[in-house]
Image: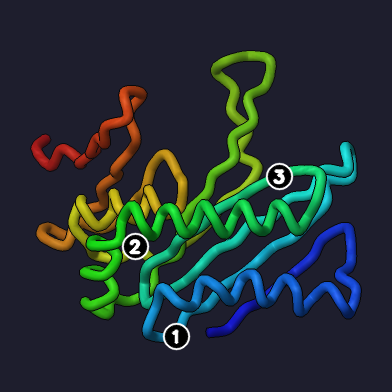
């Protein structure tokens, strides 16, 4: 297991880093193969709010949790609990996916800022990523593990780009391109 801790707008003291590593390494017990974990710890300068983002990469499966609060260690612990809940909730699906040894597909995260006029959209960040072939169920699992409202993937049956998304009622929808013109 490799753990990469990065900080922004604050520094970990030498005696603090082992404490954070020990907490994060608890996630190792859920996986038999190598797992990479990225922990981004930051302080929002404007309101001095602590933020912990933990992303776990395990053989193509990506699990992510984010937590904010007044104390960094508490944020890390809460983010770890969120990941553990996601693992428990999706245990069978994750085990099946990890067994298939698929390649890694990066997640996507778009931030949109709306100007005064509703029609005007300013794209503030662009992400590029490899579209991994998978079925809608696997894409739905990835979306849930990342905590996103949608997930773009390549359909493994027909090679087309599809999108799964979380509907307001909590169910999952699928967007497929219309190939008939």
Q: Which residue is mark 1?
A: 34
Question: Height in image: 52 above or below 3?
Answer: above
Residue 46 coordinates in the image, percent (x, y): 89, 39
Residue at the (53%, 84%) spot, across then down: 1
The mark lying in front, picked from 1 and 2, is 1
Which secondary structure, mark 1?
loop
Sequence-first tag of 1 and 2? 1
Is there a contact, CB below 8 Å, between mark 3 and mark 2?
Answer: no
Label number found at residue 155 = none
Sequence-first tag of 1 and 3? 1
Question: Height in image: 62 above or below 123?
Answer: below
Quadrant placement of the C terminus: top left
Q: Which residue is mark 3?
A: 68
On the picture, is 119 further left or further right than 174? right
Label number found at residue 131 = 2
Marks 3 and 2, how far apart in space? 30 Å
* Circle 1 crowding by C-alpha within 10 Å: few under 14, some 14–19, many from 20: few
Which secondary structure, mark 2?
loop
Residue 89 coordinates in the image, percent (x, y): 33, 52
On the picture, is 67 further left or further right than 95? right
Residue at the (52%, 49%) spot, across then down: 109
Sequence-first tag of 3 and 2? 3
Residue 110 coordinates in the image, percent (x, y): 54, 44
* Circle 3 crowding by C-alpha within 10 Å: few under 14, some 14–19, many from 20: many
Marks 1 and 3, how far apart in space? 28 Å
Residue at the (83%, 73%) spot, across then down: 16
Residue at the (65%, 42%) spot, across then down: 124
């Amino acid at each position: 297991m490799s753990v990469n801790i990065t900080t922004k707008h604050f520094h970990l003291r030498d005696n603090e880093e082992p404490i954070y590593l020990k907490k994060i390494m608890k996630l190792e017990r859920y996986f038999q193969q190598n797992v990479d974990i990225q922990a981004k710890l930051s302080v929002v300068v404007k309101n001095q709010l602590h933020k912990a983002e933990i992303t776990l990469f395990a053989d193509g499966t990506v699990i992510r949790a984010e937590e904010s609060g007044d104390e960094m260690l508490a944020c890390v612990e809460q983010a770890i609990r969120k990941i553990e809940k996601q693992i428990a909730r999706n245990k069978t699906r994750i085990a099946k996916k990890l067994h298939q040894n698929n390649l890694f597909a990066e997640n996507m995260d778009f931030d949109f800022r709306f100007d005064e006029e509703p029609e005007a959209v300013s794209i503030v960040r662009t992400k590029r990523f490899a579209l991994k072939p998978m079925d809608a169920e696997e894409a739905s699992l990835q979306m849930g593990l990342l905590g996103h409202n949608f997930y773009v993937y390549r359909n493994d049956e027909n090679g087309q780009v599809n999108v799964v998304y979380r509907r307001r009622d909590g169910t999952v929808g699928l967007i497929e391109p219309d190939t008939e013109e």
